[in-house]
Image (cartoon, rainbow, N blue to C red):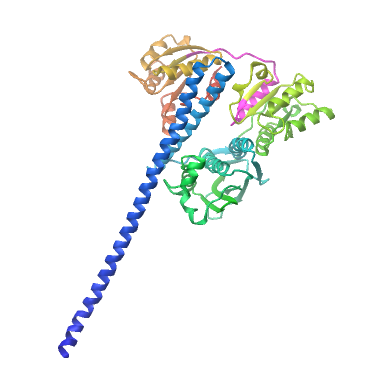
Amino acid sequence: LLLLAEIFLIFRPLENQVVNAITTSQQARDFAEKQQQKAEQASKAKSQFLANMSHELRTPLNGILGMIELSADEKKEATRFDYLNKAKSSGKHLLSIINDILDISKIEAEKLTIENFPFSLHKLLDDCLAPIAILCQKKQLNFEYENQETLPEWVSGDPIRISQVLHNILSNAVKFTPQGTIKVSVICEPAPIEASTDYNLIIVINDSGIGIAEEKLEQIFEKFTQADASTTRRFGGTGLGLNIARELVLLMQGHIEISSEVDFGTEFVITIPLQQVAAPPSQVIDNNAQTIKVAIIDDLASSRQYLSLVLERAQVQVVEFDSGVAFIEQLKHNNFAVDVVIIDFHMPELDGLETVQLIREQNLLPNIPFILISAASDQYIFNREQQNWFRAILTKPVDESHLLGLIAETLQPVATKRSLNVLIAEDNKVSALVVIKMVEKLGHQVTWVKDGVEVVDALTNPNTFDLVLMDINMPNRDGYQAANIIRQEMQLTIPIVALTANAFREDVERAKANGMNEHLSKPIIFEKLQKVLDGFA
């Protein structure tokens, strides 16, 4: 018995160690199995994502190629234009997908940087909400917007990334809401005392859409994961938008909260810290600005607020109307006079074009200039007579100085801008043709060269050209090298505008460091090119 007791005492600790070892081994196996399951799920989700991405890329690409092929054989000008407009829309959609992929890549590589510079908060909200309001109108959804009356006018942060976050979440809200309402509420709260910022911008987005099950809420922010794979088949999309939105908000030191109920809708609460800054000096239209009265006609409250702030800071009198119908009623029943009318294109009941047509037919406001503003490039679907109804047709986002300068111009006799002799350097024939036709459409003369060597040779007589539009990636001598020679060796001050597919901050800085005046990223947007050329004309 004594011997058995001694053996028991000796082996009892070993028994505990064996049990512990077995338990630990089992836990390790369980953990390994769970990790393997997660890896398999992630791999499966990634494979589904890549398959879906292939579909999402091919669909707009097929639209571009198909519509262009149809337009080539179409005899009717109106039908051909419709085909080309659809090709353009598909191209924009393809570009947005590529931008999402690039953003995800930069986020994963930890190379996406957040900017910090002053911007108009009201302008940002208007630029973001106007296209969404149009989507809601087309889908017959109600769109509601409310904001705090004391929102700061100017703040410091990254407006491009804030806009991207709002666009991604609002686009999702519209997509997954078959009927009902999209509502956006905006407030600014003072930041905590210990914070390094002044405000927390809080944006609440509600929809009455299909909703998300509680157990799947966390999944919607994960990479390569959908809350429900069937939604991809039903509604389309890459599934990258919400992941990008969350990562951007986190990079801006903010956070996103989500709550949802199946069949009743979803609520996102976005909080982003911002610093308040002083508003820049406002451009004054002229010494008699206080006597100028401008009517703003727009159904979207955020648009009216932004335009009113811009004009009132320039000491211009403003009167607002939320519809074309209300404006026409005012003209008919009151002794009402204005100097300029700014009207939105997309409005219910009467759109901007229909409103102006009625005013012209009834001669309610003779000889008063109209400026048309739209959230989409709709001016190209107007015929020449309709375009002549307007002193200018602008596409949002509308730059403050551009708008004020335009109003000043509309109050003066119509003047012709100087025609420029533009030197275009582009090695790709198709890209060159696109830029050449855009520049010629704006009334300027064009000379085309194919690389940086030919640019320098063409500028041996510096008085021949007024402006250089130069691609960066060219054979023999790239755009940076050519610009450096033009500035350093030739000592020329001719304006140089970089045209490049490189749209990152470091590319813009490098262009400026080599003496370039402006930077336009490809694909070239006609309105942006026009603004740059107008500045030099």
- The answer to which quarter of the image holds residue 472 is top left
Question: Is 18 rendered above or below residue 237?
Answer: below
**In the displayed structure, does residue 315 sit left or right of residue 364?**
left
Question: Toward the viewer: 195 or 30?
Answer: 30
At x 68% / y 39%, what residue is drawn?
A: 301
- Outermost residue toward the left? 3
- State whether residue 46 appears in this view: yes
- State whether residue 242 appears in this view: no
| Image spot of residue 410 (x, y percent) | 68, 21
| Image spot of residue 8 (x, y percent) | 20, 83
**In the displayed structure, does residue 339 sit left or right of residue 529?**
right
- The answer to which quarter of the image holds residue 459 is top left
At x 56% / y 50%, what residue is drawn?
A: 211
> What's drawn in magenta, residue-wise?
394-422
Confirm whether the magenta stretch covers residue 395: yes
| Image spot of residue 475 (x, y percent) | 34, 19
**In the displayed structure, does residue 42 sit left or right of residue 170?**
left
